[in-house]
Image (cartoon, helix red, strand yellow):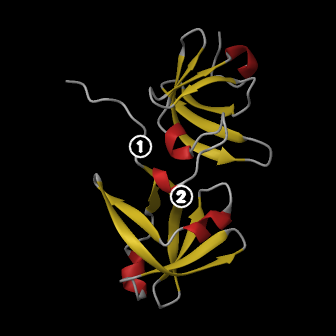
Amino acid sequence: MGSMKKLQDYLTVGYVLRPRGVKGEVKVEPLTDSIEQFNEWDVLYIKDGDQYYPLKIITKRYIRNSVYISFEGYNNMNMAEKLRGQYLWIPRDQIGDLPEDTFFIADILGCEVRTQEGVTLGKVERVIHTGSNDVYLVKGSTGEVLIPGLKKVILDIDIIEKEIIVAAQELEGLLPDED
Protein backbone atom coordinates (compact mmCIF):
# COMPACT_ATOMS: atom_id res chain seq x y z
CA MET A 1 0.00 0.00 0.00
CA GLY A 2 1.35 3.43 -0.91
CA SER A 3 1.47 5.79 2.02
CA MET A 4 -0.86 8.77 1.87
CA LYS A 5 1.03 11.86 0.87
CA LYS A 6 0.76 14.61 3.39
CA LEU A 7 2.50 17.76 4.49
CA GLN A 8 5.44 17.57 6.82
CA ASP A 9 4.44 17.67 10.47
CA TYR A 10 7.43 19.83 11.41
CA LEU A 11 8.84 22.94 9.77
CA THR A 12 12.35 24.27 10.09
CA VAL A 13 12.53 27.73 11.65
CA GLY A 14 16.25 28.16 12.26
CA TYR A 15 19.74 26.88 11.63
CA VAL A 16 22.37 26.66 14.39
CA LEU A 17 25.50 28.42 13.14
CA ARG A 18 27.80 27.96 16.13
CA PRO A 19 28.14 28.09 19.91
CA ARG A 20 28.69 31.50 21.45
CA GLY A 21 30.46 32.01 24.75
CA VAL A 22 31.08 29.34 27.39
CA LYS A 23 27.58 28.99 28.85
CA GLY A 24 26.07 26.93 26.03
CA GLU A 25 24.38 29.68 24.06
CA VAL A 26 24.15 29.17 20.27
CA LYS A 27 23.87 31.62 17.41
CA VAL A 28 20.88 30.80 15.21
CA GLU A 29 20.10 32.01 11.71
CA PRO A 30 16.31 32.44 11.59
CA LEU A 31 14.52 30.86 8.61
CA THR A 32 11.26 32.64 9.31
CA ASP A 33 9.61 35.67 7.74
CA SER A 34 10.14 37.69 10.88
CA ILE A 35 12.63 37.13 13.65
CA GLU A 36 9.93 38.09 16.18
CA GLN A 37 8.22 34.74 15.57
CA PHE A 38 10.81 33.28 17.97
CA ASN A 39 9.00 35.14 20.76
CA GLU A 40 6.09 32.71 20.35
CA TRP A 41 8.08 29.54 21.05
CA ASP A 42 9.31 28.06 24.34
CA VAL A 43 10.39 24.75 22.81
CA LEU A 44 12.18 24.03 19.55
CA TYR A 45 13.00 20.58 18.19
CA ILE A 46 16.06 18.95 16.69
CA LYS A 47 15.77 16.05 14.31
CA ASP A 48 17.70 12.82 14.58
CA GLY A 49 16.80 10.33 11.87
CA ASP A 50 13.00 10.39 11.78
CA GLN A 51 12.62 11.50 15.38
CA TYR A 52 12.17 15.02 16.69
CA TYR A 53 13.51 15.84 20.16
CA PRO A 54 12.31 18.86 22.15
CA LEU A 55 14.76 21.47 23.44
CA LYS A 56 13.38 23.81 26.06
CA ILE A 57 14.48 27.41 25.54
CA ILE A 58 15.93 29.08 28.63
CA THR A 59 16.99 32.41 27.15
CA LYS A 60 16.79 34.09 23.77
CA ARG A 61 18.02 37.43 22.60
CA TYR A 62 18.24 39.16 19.27
CA ILE A 63 21.33 40.79 17.83
CA ARG A 64 20.98 42.18 14.32
CA ASN A 65 19.55 39.34 12.19
CA SER A 66 20.45 36.49 14.52
CA VAL A 67 18.82 34.88 17.53
CA TYR A 68 21.01 33.76 20.42
CA ILE A 69 19.38 30.91 22.29
CA SER A 70 20.34 28.81 25.27
CA PHE A 71 18.61 25.47 25.78
CA GLU A 72 17.97 23.44 28.91
CA GLY A 73 20.62 20.73 29.30
CA TYR A 74 23.09 22.52 27.03
CA ASN A 75 24.93 24.58 29.58
CA ASN A 76 28.48 24.66 28.28
CA MET A 77 30.37 25.11 25.04
CA ASN A 78 30.96 21.37 24.46
CA MET A 79 27.25 20.60 24.76
CA ALA A 80 26.37 23.56 22.53
CA GLU A 81 28.89 22.35 19.93
CA LYS A 82 26.67 19.27 19.40
CA LEU A 83 23.96 21.60 18.07
CA ARG A 84 26.22 23.17 15.42
CA GLY A 85 24.81 22.66 11.93
CA GLN A 86 21.43 21.42 13.21
CA TYR A 87 18.15 22.74 11.92
CA LEU A 88 15.64 23.80 14.56
CA TRP A 89 12.06 22.70 13.97
CA ILE A 90 8.59 23.36 15.31
CA PRO A 91 5.38 21.41 14.85
CA ARG A 92 3.42 22.82 11.90
CA ASP A 93 0.36 23.38 14.08
CA GLN A 94 2.31 25.96 16.13
CA ILE A 95 2.41 28.28 13.15
CA GLY A 96 -0.72 30.15 12.17
CA ASP A 97 -2.23 29.80 8.72
CA LEU A 98 -0.29 31.38 5.90
CA PRO A 99 -1.79 33.93 3.57
CA GLU A 100 -2.92 32.45 0.26
CA ASP A 101 -0.14 31.75 -2.26
CA THR A 102 2.56 31.75 0.37
CA PHE A 103 4.41 28.62 1.42
CA PHE A 104 6.81 27.42 4.07
CA ILE A 105 10.38 26.98 2.85
CA ALA A 106 10.32 23.44 4.25
CA ASP A 107 7.49 22.63 1.85
CA ILE A 108 9.24 24.13 -1.19
CA LEU A 109 12.55 22.31 -0.62
CA GLY A 110 12.76 19.07 -2.56
CA CYS A 111 9.92 19.97 -4.92
CA GLU A 112 10.42 18.85 -8.49
CA VAL A 113 10.41 21.80 -10.89
CA ARG A 114 9.00 21.41 -14.41
CA THR A 115 8.12 23.75 -17.24
CA GLN A 116 4.52 23.76 -18.39
CA GLU A 117 5.74 21.77 -21.40
CA GLY A 118 6.79 19.00 -19.03
CA VAL A 119 10.56 19.52 -19.09
CA THR A 120 12.04 18.63 -15.68
CA LEU A 121 14.55 21.21 -14.44
CA GLY A 122 15.42 19.49 -11.16
CA LYS A 123 14.62 19.78 -7.47
CA VAL A 124 14.62 22.85 -5.24
CA GLU A 125 17.82 22.69 -3.16
CA ARG A 126 17.64 26.09 -1.47
CA VAL A 127 15.47 29.13 -1.16
CA ILE A 128 17.48 32.34 -1.29
CA HIS A 129 15.99 35.53 0.14
CA THR A 130 16.70 38.58 -1.97
CA GLY A 131 15.33 42.01 -1.21
CA SER A 132 12.33 41.82 -3.50
CA ASN A 133 11.48 38.14 -3.99
CA ASP A 134 12.67 34.67 -3.11
CA VAL A 135 14.83 32.81 -5.61
CA TYR A 136 14.69 29.02 -5.87
CA LEU A 137 17.99 27.28 -6.50
CA VAL A 138 17.08 24.24 -8.57
CA LYS A 139 19.58 21.43 -9.19
CA GLY A 140 19.04 18.98 -12.01
CA SER A 141 20.90 16.82 -14.52
CA THR A 142 21.73 19.90 -16.62
CA GLY A 143 23.11 21.85 -13.66
CA GLU A 144 21.79 24.63 -11.46
CA VAL A 145 19.03 27.06 -12.36
CA LEU A 146 18.01 30.10 -10.36
CA ILE A 147 14.26 30.66 -10.61
CA PRO A 148 12.73 33.89 -9.31
CA GLY A 149 9.70 33.26 -7.10
CA LEU A 150 7.43 35.57 -9.06
CA LYS A 151 3.79 34.95 -10.00
CA LYS A 152 4.49 35.31 -13.72
CA VAL A 153 7.22 32.64 -13.48
CA ILE A 154 5.74 30.19 -10.95
CA LEU A 155 2.47 28.94 -12.43
CA ASP A 156 1.60 26.35 -9.81
CA ILE A 157 2.98 24.96 -6.57
CA ASP A 158 1.60 21.66 -5.33
CA ILE A 159 3.26 20.95 -1.99
CA ILE A 160 1.40 17.67 -1.49
CA GLU A 161 2.68 16.23 -4.78
CA LYS A 162 5.97 18.14 -4.27
CA GLU A 163 5.95 19.78 -7.70
CA ILE A 164 6.29 23.28 -9.07
CA ILE A 165 5.30 24.26 -12.61
CA VAL A 166 7.13 27.23 -14.14
CA ALA A 167 6.61 29.30 -17.29
CA ALA A 168 9.59 28.52 -19.51
CA GLN A 169 9.10 31.65 -21.63
CA GLU A 170 9.63 33.78 -18.51
CA LEU A 171 12.97 32.05 -17.87
CA GLU A 172 14.55 33.07 -21.17
CA GLY A 173 18.31 33.11 -20.68
CA LEU A 174 18.15 31.50 -17.23
CA LEU A 175 17.89 27.88 -18.35
CA PRO A 176 20.96 25.83 -19.28
CA ASP A 177 21.67 25.44 -23.03
CA GLU A 178 18.31 25.84 -24.66
CA ASP A 179 19.24 24.76 -28.19
Q: Is residue 129 above or below residue 111?
A: below
Image quarter (top left, top right, bottom left or bottom right) of the C terminus: top right
Q: Which residue lies most toward the left here?
A: 1
Looking at the image, which is closer to me, 56 or 152?
56
Mark 2 to mark 1 CA distance (whole Å): 13 Å
Image quarter (top left, top right, bottom left or bottom right) of the N terminus: top left
- What is the secondary structure assignment of the residue under circle 1? loop
Query: Can you tell which mark lies on residue 18?
Result: none
Asked whether, in this view, residue 86 is left or right of residue 27, the answer is left
Residue at horizontal 44%, vertical 26%? 161
- The x and y percentages for residue 173 are 74, 22
Q: Which residue lies most toward the bottom here?
A: 22
- The x and y percentages for residue 166 are 64, 21
Tell me which corner region of the image, top left, top right, bottom left or bottom right, holds residue 67. Answer: bottom right
Count of numbered circles in the view:
2
Mark 2 — residue? Answer: 13
Mark 1 — residue? Answer: 8
Tell me which corner region of the image, top left, top right, bottom left or bottom right, holds residue 178. Answer: top right
Asked whether, in this view, residue 116 is left or right of residue 49, the answer is right
Tell me the amino acid under the disc marked 2. Answer: Val
Tell me which corner region of the image, top left, top right, bottom left or bottom right, holds residue 82. Answer: bottom left
Residue at horizontal 63%, vertical 18%? 177
Residue at horizontal 68%, vertical 17%? 167
- The x and y percentages for residue 36 are 67, 66
Tell me the amino acid under the disc marked 1. Answer: Gln
Is mark 2 in CB contact (under 8 Å) with mark 1?
A: no
Crowding around mark 2 (Cα neighbors within 10 Å: few <14, some 14 to 19, many 20+) is many
Instruction: Judge whether residue 11 can be spotted in this image.
Output: no
Q: Is residue 81 above or below residue 139?
A: below
Among the two numbered marks 2 and 1 on one chain, the one whose residue lies closer to the N terminus: 1
